Structure formats: structure tokens, C-alpha cells
Image: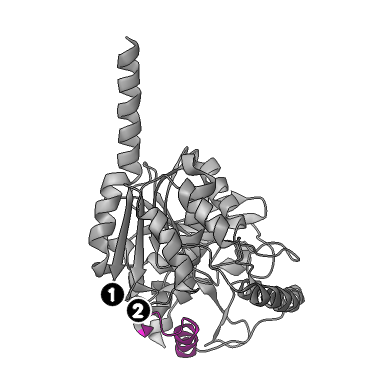
């Protein structure tokens, strides 16, 4: 099928220097069979030109797509659970051309290294990932855009490190979700047992079940509970699959299967309330009107009531599903661009420079 033609040669040149990240999907040799964006599978051009980058971390590397100028600090884009940097393929082209945007694959997702065998995925560990990236690029502060799981990560990061964030844009999931305690305990039991099973499967090095391109699209579509329009599923599928070594016309999912049993629990509602009080940076939160709240709405409302009283918090309800930034990005791009223009890295850097000059003049 011509639409599945993969330009493996050009991809190999870009990723030859990627270090081994552990497991069968982490080495440079295996990455030549991987895909950076949907066009590597379909022959289409990328939705916007980007540079594939690799950031060294203690367990391997973090992969990412850097859009726009590379001589300025980018906004850091973080995806949802089991998605990858492709989640922003349809939103980023609508940003102002002078805005730099670095969409990364979190550990175990996309082209990033898995955690070593035997290591468990915890939500709070992603705070460490953000700090590592900041250290790598020598950023004093960071501007964050997060969807779903990563929107929650942004909320927590801004509360834990309020002096290290210039701005946040969160999409659809506001805060750590609350569950009845008996349910939390049962979930811990089930997830740990299933994690052990998947960890053993990873060590076996056996190829997972493989599927045709159309079957993969259908599985992604069903897996998101139809949240992503079927024609857009290719954007979050591409970086999560690998060409089968057994069947020439098939592919398998190569994101870390342990992610299915990731520990998302962060803390109590009381902790979430305290976090909301601690957030001081400009913050835009966008909620899809056709999406659920993922918890009893009273918990969401309590935190939103705290945030909405802050002068630099903006709240937007937009028509759309949980993946509205993929299905109808044009409906939210106006407020997003306005917010970035006011509070993004360039605006924040200019404000800091102005403050320094004012302080210098006051001493004269």
C-alpha cells in the first residue's frame, strides 16, 4: 500500500545518535523502524516543520519535536496518558510563527526511553522530567502546555515550584482526581499485579501482537473512547508503533505496556486545595463541554473556585471532547495565542529584563 511507504533512510540519519533507553524499543537500531509523525506512514508532509531532538537523561533519552525558532526558549508541550508529542500536531501549526514549541514524549511514550525493567511509572515522577529538561537547557523558568494527564502534571508542578513557572495552559483535566478510598486500594492491588505481568513481558523481548494500519487506527479510536476523531488518530499513533519484524505489512504498539498500570494517585482533595492556593503564575484552563470531569464534580468545582479568584487565571469552556485540541483546535487557538502573547516565554523574558533595568535605575 503506497500510503504506508516509510522514508526509513532519512529517519535513520536523524536518530543514529539516540542512546539505548532499555528494552527492545529504546535502542538506535530499533528506532530506525519507528515513525516521527503521521507522514512517515502516509507520505503526507508534516503539519508543521520540526526538528527531532533527543535530551539525555539518566535512564536514556527524552525525544521531542521542536517547532519554530531554536534560538529562543520554547513552550514545553506535555501530552496525555499513553499519547505522545503527536497530540500537538494539529494545534501547533496555528500558533504564531515566531513562537517556539517543544513537544516531548514522556518516558515510556513515543520515541522516549522506557524506564528500566522493574521501575514503576508514577505521575509525580514527571515533575523530575520537567526539571531535568530545564537543567539541560538552562531555563530559569518554564512555560507549560499540558493535555489530560499532563494538564494535571502542570497544575502540580506550578504548585510545587511556583517560582519556576512563567505560565500554564491546561487542557481538559484540571487537578489530581479523587476516588473513594476503597476504590483506590483495589486499584493499587490490581495495577501492581498487572504491572508485574507487563514487566515480565517486556523482559521476554517477544514481539507484541501486530496489526494492519487500519486495525491500528481502529484500536486507537476505540482506546480514546472515540474522543479523537478517527481521521486524526494517526497523529498520536505514529510515534507509538513500530514495524513488525514478522509480518511485512503489520505494526505493533511499542510504547511501554507498563504504562497501562501507571500510578496516577497524587494526594487528597485537601492537598489539591493547598496546591491551588500556591499557584501564582498566569494560568489558562480550557474545559471541553463534551468531556467528563473524571471525578465527582464537587472536587473540581472546589479547586476551580479558588483559581478563578486569581487575577491571572483565565477559564474557557470550549465545545468539544477530551481531545478538542486535535479535533477542533481552531475553536481554542484564539485564546491560546492571546495568552501566549501576554505571558509566554518572550513576554516573560521582556518583563524580567524591564524589571532588571528598573532596579538598576533605582540604584543610580
Q: Which residues are magenta?
A: 213-230
The residue wearing badge 1 is 319
Q: Nearer the viewer, residue 128 or 308?
A: 308
Quadrant housing residue 90: bottom left
Q: Secondary structure at mark 1?
A: loop
At x 47%, y 49%, the residue is 277
Vertical placement of 21 versus 346: above or below? below
Give x and y (percent) for residue 191. 69, 76
The residue wearing badge 2 is 290
Q: Is residue 59 left or right of residue 174?
A: right
User: Can you say which quadrant of the picture contains the N terminus?
Assistant: bottom left
Q: Is residue 90 in the magenta section? A: no
**Which numbered tag is attached to residue 334?**
none
Give x and y (percent) for residue 338. 24, 53
Q: Are marks 2 and 1 in contact (CB under 8 Å)?
A: yes
Label 1 crowd bin: few (<14), some (14–19), many (20+), radius 10 Å = some
Quadrant housing residue 119: bottom right
Q: Is residue 136 left or right of residue 22?
A: left
Vertical placement of 292 versus 11: above or below? below
Q: Is residue 147 in view?
A: no
Amino acid at each position: 500500500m503506497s500510503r504506508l511507504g516509510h522514508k526509513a533512510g532519512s529517519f535513520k540519519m536523524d536518530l543514529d545518535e539516540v542512546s539505548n533507553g532499555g528494552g527492545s524499543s529504546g535502542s538506535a537500531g530499533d528506532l530506525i523502524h519507528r515513525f516521527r509523525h503521521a507522514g512517515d506512514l502516509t507520505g503526507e508532509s508534516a503539519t508543521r516543520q520540526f526538528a527531532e531532538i533527543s535530551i539525555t537523561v539518566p535512564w536514556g533519552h527524552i525525544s521531542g519535536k521542536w517547532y519554530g525558532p531554536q534560538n529562543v526558549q520554547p513552550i514545553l508541550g506535555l501530552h496525555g496518558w499513553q499519547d505522545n508529542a503527536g497530540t500537538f500536531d494539529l494545534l501547533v501549526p496555528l500558533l504564531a510563527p515566531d513562537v517556539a514549541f517543544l513537544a516531548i514524549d514522556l518516558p515510556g511514550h513515543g520515541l522516549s526511553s522506557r524506564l528500566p525493567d522493574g521501575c514503576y511509572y508514577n505521575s509525580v515522577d514527571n515533575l523530575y522530567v520537567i526539571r531535568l529538561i530545564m537543567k539541560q537547557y538552562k531555563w530559569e523558568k518554564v512555560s507549560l502546555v499540558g493535555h489530560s494527564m499532563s494538564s494535571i502534571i502542570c497544575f502540580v508542578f506550578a504548585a510545587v515550584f511556583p517560582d519556576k513557572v512563567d505560565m500554564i495552559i491546561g487542557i481538559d483535566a484540571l487537578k489530581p482526581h479523587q476516588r473513594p478510598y476503597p476504590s483506590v486500594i483495589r486499584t493499587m492491588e490490581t495495577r501492581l499485579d498487572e504491572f508485574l505481568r507487563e514487566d515480565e513481558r517486556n523482559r521476554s523481548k517477544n514481539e507484541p501482537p501486530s496489526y494492519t494500519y487500519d486495525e491500528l487506527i481502529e484500536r486507537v479510536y476505540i482506546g480514546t473512547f472515540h474522543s479523537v476523531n478517527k481521521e486524526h488518530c494517526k497523529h498520536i499513533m505514529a510515534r507509538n508503533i513500530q514495524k513488525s519484524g514478522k509480518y511485512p505489512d503489520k505494526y505493533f504498539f511499542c510504547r511501554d505496556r507498563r504504562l497501562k498500570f501507571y500510578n496516577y494517585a497524587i494526594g487528597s482533595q485537601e492537598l489539591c486545595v493547598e496546591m491551588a492556593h500556591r499557584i501564582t503564575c498566569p494560568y489558562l484552563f480550557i474545559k471541553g463541554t463534551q468531556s467528563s470531569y473524571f471525578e465527582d464534580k464537587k472536587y473540581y468545582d472546589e479547586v476551580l473556585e479558588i483559581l478563578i479568584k486569581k487575577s491571572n487565571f483565565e477559564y474557557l469552556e470550549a465545545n468539544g471532547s477530551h481531545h478538542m485540541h486535535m479535533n477542533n483546535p481552531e475553536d481554542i487557538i484564539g485564546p491560546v495565542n492571546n495568552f501566549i502573547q501576554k505571558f509566554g516565554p518572550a513576554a516573560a523574558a521582556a518583563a524580567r529584563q524591564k524589571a532588571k533595568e528598573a532596579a538598576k535605575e533605582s540604584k543610580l
